[in-house]
Image (cartoon, rainbow, N blue to C red):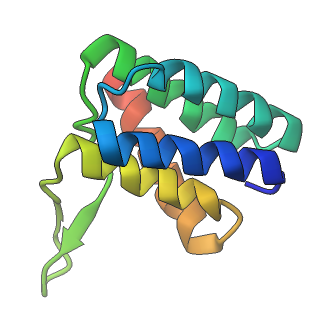
Amino acid sequence: MKILAANKKLDEIILKVENQGIEAEGLIEDLKNLREYALKEQDPLVTKVLRLTHEYLTENNSFDIEAQYEEDEEGNEYPLEIEDKENLLYLLNLLKNAEHKINREEIKDYRTALKEELY
């Protein structure tokens, strides 16, 4: 995220999740507020991922999204087994530098996985 206040808010959310997990009080509201910054930054990918993330957390009380994959020698991909908390933290840390090409690709993977699960 580009706006200093957005990065500060994102850091606060990351710290909250690290300390309290995905059931942290006010987490959904924090994600909604962070989404407002993404709207100001005019970043539709981050805006959508934040909306889908808080919707998923609200509906499922978990973050068991399969968006990270491991590849074997033959090129077959397998979803990584990641705890909900670590999975959400990984996504939030990707958002810290959402303009980076590789991070952006992974954020798109999360967007796709979230959309498939929610709709």
Front-lying residue, 69 or 32: 32
Count of numbered circles on the image? 0
Horizontally, is 80 left or right of 90 in the view? left
- Residue 45 can be seen in this image: yes
Residue 77's x, y, as percent? 19, 66
Residue 70's x, y, as percent? 20, 70
For residue 16, which quarter of the picture?
top left
Identified at 34% across, 48% down, the residue is 18
Identified at 26% across, 44% down, the residue is 85
For residue 103, which quarter of the picture?
bottom right
Question: Which residue in the rendered view is the most extreme toward the top?
Answer: 59
Q: Quadrant of the C terminus?
A: top left
Horizontally, is 112 left or right of 23 in the view? right
Residue 93's x, y, as percent? 50, 59
Question: Which residue in the rendered view is the most extreme toward the bottom?
Answer: 73
Give the answer, above or below, for where 83 lies relative to 102: above
Front-lying residue, 95 or 10: 10
Horizontally, is 57 left or right of 96 in the view? left
- Residue 66 can be seen in this image: no
Identified at 40% across, 33% down, the residue is 114
Front-lying residue, 95 or 17: 17
Q: Quadrant of the N terminus?
A: bottom right
Identified at 57% across, 33% down, the residue is 50
Residue 91's x, y, as percent? 44, 51
Give the answer, above or below, for where 48 lies relative to 84: above
